[in-house]
Structures are given as C-alpha cells and as structure tokens.
Image: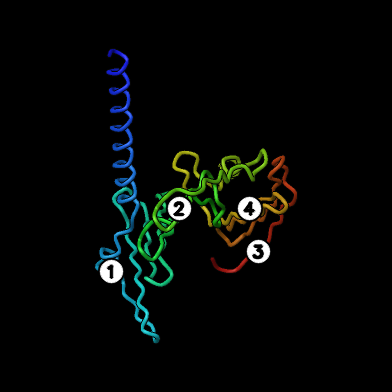
Amino acid sequence: MKYVIILVLCLCSISDCTGQNNKNKKEDMDEEKLDISRLARKGKKTVYDNGEVSYCWKYKEKDGTVVVIEGDKEDGYTESRIPKNSFREIYKEYYPSGILKFKGSLFGEHTKIGTWHYYDSEGNLVEEVDENKKFGKFGYIEVLQFLINNKYVDKDTFEGIFRIRITFWAEDLTWYIRVTTPGYIINEYEISGNTGEIKSHNVSQGGEM
C-alpha cells in the first residue's frame, strides 16, 4: 500500500505541474499578444484607396525608450523598442491576429544578435536561433568597444556622440562602420569579424547630416 500511495502522490504532483505549466504558457502568450484594439485607439489611422486601414503609434516611455508599433490586419504588425543611448533595438513581429510571430534584438543597421524566437500562428514556440554564432571572434560587443576606444561613443552612457551606421555582412564576415563627425567628416571602416583586423579605413568630406 505504501508504494501505491507514493505512486499516486507522484502522479498528482506531475498533473499539478502540467496544469501549472499550461497556465503559465497561456499567461505568457497573453502577455506577448499585441493589444490591437489599444493600437487602434492610440495610433494614427491611415486609410488607403483600396479601403485598407493601418495604424502607427509612436511614444516614449519614462526611461527614454522609444516605442513604435505599426501595421494592419492584412500583413500583421511590428513593434520596435529602442532604449535611450543604446545601439540595441528590441524587435517583434505579430500575426494579423496579434499573436507573436517572432522576437529578438537588433544591433546597428538591423543586424540580428542574441537568441531569436519564432512562433506558429497559435503562439507555440517552433524555433530558436542563436544569431551570435554567425560572428567570428569580433562580435557586436567588440564593435561597441571599438567605437568607445575611438571616442565615437561615450564609455559611461554608451551614447553615440556622432552619427553612426553599423552593418554586418555574414557572407564575408565583415563589419561596415560609417561615422559622421562634426564638420561632416566621414570615417568608413571595414573590420574583419574573424580577427577584428581593420581591413580598410577611408576618410572623406561629406555634406550635411
């Protein structure tokens, strides 16, 4: 009888955990789901000639994070969150239903970093991709340190002192960095993602920023 009691208790515990996991999963899905009705109330409405309607809501949170949510019921919706003084953008895309389609972080000119999560139309996680694997030894953290060392970025606030564009090409594992300084002097770098070696550095006079 003792073994039967232990078995029953174990089964009950497993059942409770499963129920709790399902509850947590539903709560997570609800939290990640876009509130389309709120977007419609808060966002700017645009009506096109074909009758389609889209919304765009831009606002700034108390900590300085800039948020942009936009889209329509035909193609779905996107959400961009850029913290103050940051080169990282938190990006999400939603199905037309408002269910999360995928999410992850972007660095510079839309370079994916960290782990990206992909979901089916019911909100189930179907894939996780570690985008950091595409970098060599010189990843986005090293790029940020390069900008700090060259005084293009403030080391304490991580604020870009100058206008900076950063792109990573996975095909040749190369970072392309363009910095426009006061006086419209343009510094362009090509840096190896494998070694961190500066493959080229060109300086030119540009027009107004």
Identify the disc placed on residue 168.
Answer: 4
Identify the disc placed on residue 96.
Answer: none
Amino acid at the residue labelled 1: Ala
**Contact flag, marks 2 and 4 (Cβ < 8 Å):** no
Q: Single out the residue that lies furthest toward the front.
A: 1
Q: Nearer the viewer, mark 4 or mark 1?
A: 1
How far apart marks 4 and 1 lie (CA) works out to 36 Å
Q: Nearer the viewer, mark 3 or mark 4?
A: 4
Would you place residue 177 above or below residue 148 in this image? below
Identify the disc placed on residue 205.
Answer: 3
Amino acid at the residue labelled 3: Gln
How far apart marks 2 and 4 lie (CA) works out to 25 Å
The residue tagged 1 is: 40
The residue tagged 2 is: 119
Q: Tell which circle, 1 or 3, labels the residue nearer the N-terminal end.
A: 1
Q: Indicate the secondary structure of the residue bearing disc 3.
A: strand
Q: Residues within 10 Å of mark 4 (few under 14, many from 20)?
A: many
**Contact flag, marks 4 and 1 (Cβ < 8 Å):** no
What x and y, as percent, mark residue 20?
A: 29, 36
Would you place residue 53 above or below residue 88 in this image? below
Query: What residue is shown at x 69% (from left), y 48% (from top)?
Result: 191
Q: Indicate the secondary structure of the residue bearing disc 2.
A: strand
Amino acid at the residue labelled 4: Phe
